[in-house]
């Protein structure tokens, strides 16, 4: 979870990024909605005092549990419903149930239908580790021309592919987001505009600092920070896998204005992953300053 000040600054950043052309398609004045920046992929609602709003969280989970997934029409209905409750943009994962039938033509048809009917901008989402399906580059290039498709989150980790997408869509108003902090620097180097990084939920200030270093061309310092974030990012991925298996006792973060190792409790049976140790070192070392900085 992000510290209160970091979370506040992230929310302000998201508000700035998505407020300019929210409400669907670009009006023709300027570019499509700007999705650049660092996004922690959370759906957790917070109160004005940065506490988890458990009542709203329960409502959200109930709403999401009622939505069918995968089919084009169901995706359209879900997107419209999300817009009605205040979503600024919709990140739409590739349909993958009929994996053998999901060629470029089928995917282009699916996303075009969704984007045509969505009242809010659409971001393509390719996550082959979970779907077994990579959104083909040729399909991305075609879809980048749609006025209501503003970009893609690519979680595959193939920096060559990310660079190729940036290159082939350079004449379109289309933005590319890295899907992990593990390859964030490399993605910025080939033209990405930001990332949806789960690690930002724990090391938000550090991930945002990496963004600043890349945007200001401080590549040597960016490389050093990227190296330090690789193991924590891998550990975060391991943690997610355990939590998805119901082992929520493994990692218990306690809220505080500043985070330090005393707020993280591990059972004695938990493997001593070096990535977690590095994560805690980053929190301890930078906690006195980085968590106080605006993200």
Image (cartoon, rainbow, N blue to C red):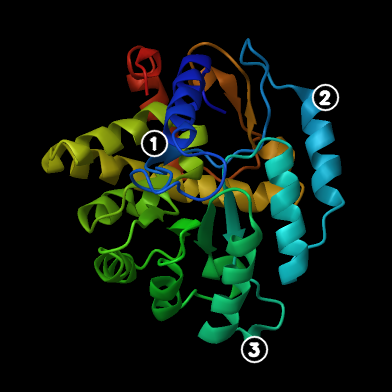
The x, y position of residue 64, in whole percent, is 80, 47
SS for dot 1: helix
Quarter holding the N terminus is top right
Rendered residue at 67%/39% (across/down): 250
The x, y position of residue 30, in whole percent, is 33, 44
SS for dot 2: helix
Q: Is residue 218 visible?
A: yes
Rendered residue at 58%/69% (across/down): 111
* Disc nearer the start of the sequence (3/2): 2
Query: Is residue 220 shown left or right of residue 222?
Result: left
Rendered residue at 70%/22% (across/down): 52
The x, y position of residue 146, in whole percent, is 46, 65
Which residue is disc 2 drawn over?
A: 55
- Between marks 3 and 2 in the image, the one whose residue lies nearer the viewer: 3
Query: How far, Cα to Cα, is label 1 from label 3?
Result: 43 Å
Query: How far, Cα to Cα, is label 3 from label 2?
Result: 41 Å
* Disc nearer the start of the sequence (2/1): 2
**Which corner quadrant of the image does residue 94 belong to?**
bottom right
Which residue is disc 1 drawn over?
A: 278
Q: Is 216 situated above or below 94?
A: above
Which residue is disc 3 drawn over?
A: 101
What residue occupies the far bottom of the structure in this picture? 100
Rendered residue at 38%/12% (across/down): 292
SS for dot 3: helix
Query: How far, Cα to Cα, is label 2 from label 1?
Result: 34 Å
The x, y position of residue 63, in whole percent, is 83, 43
Q: Is residue 274 visible?
A: no
Quarter holding the C terminus is top left
């Amino acid at each position: 979870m992000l510290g209160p000040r970091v979370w506040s600054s992230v929310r302000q950043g998201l508000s700035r990024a998505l407020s300019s052309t929210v409400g669907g398609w670009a009006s023709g004045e300027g570019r499509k909605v700007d999705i650049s920046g660092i996004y922690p992929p959370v759906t957790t609602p917070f109160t004005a005092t940065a506490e988890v709003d458990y009542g709203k969280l329960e409502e959200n989970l109930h709403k999401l549990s009622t939505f069918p997934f995968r089919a084009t029409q169901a995706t359209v209905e879900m997107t419209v419903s999300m817009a009605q409750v205040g979503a600024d943009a919709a990140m739409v994962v590739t349909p993958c149930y009929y994996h053998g039938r999901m060629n470029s033509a089928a995917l282009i048809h699916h996303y075009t239908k969704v984007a045509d009917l969505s009242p809010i901008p659409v971001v393509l989402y390719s996550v082959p580790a979970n779907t077994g399906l990579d959104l083909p580059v040729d399909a991305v290039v075609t879809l980048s021309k749609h006025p209501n498709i503003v970009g893609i989150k690519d979680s595959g980790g193939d920096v060559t592919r990310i660079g190729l997408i940036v290159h082939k869509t350079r004449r379109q108003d289309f933005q590319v987001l890295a899907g992990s902090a593990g390859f964030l620097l490399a993605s910025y180097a080939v033209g990405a505009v930001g990332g949806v990084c789960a690690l930002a939920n724990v090391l938000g200030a550090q991930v945002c600092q990496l963004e600043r270093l890349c945007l200001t061309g401080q590549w040597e310092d960016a490389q050093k920070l990227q190296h330090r974030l690789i193991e924590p990012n891998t550990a975060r991925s391991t943690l997610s896998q355990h939590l998805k298996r119901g082992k929520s006792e493994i990692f218990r973060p306690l809220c505080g204005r500043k985070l330090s190792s005393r707020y993280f409790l591990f059972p004695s049976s938990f493997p001593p992953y070096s990535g977690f140790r590095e994560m805690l070192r980053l929190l301890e070392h930078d906690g006195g300053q980085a968590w106080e900085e605006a993200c």
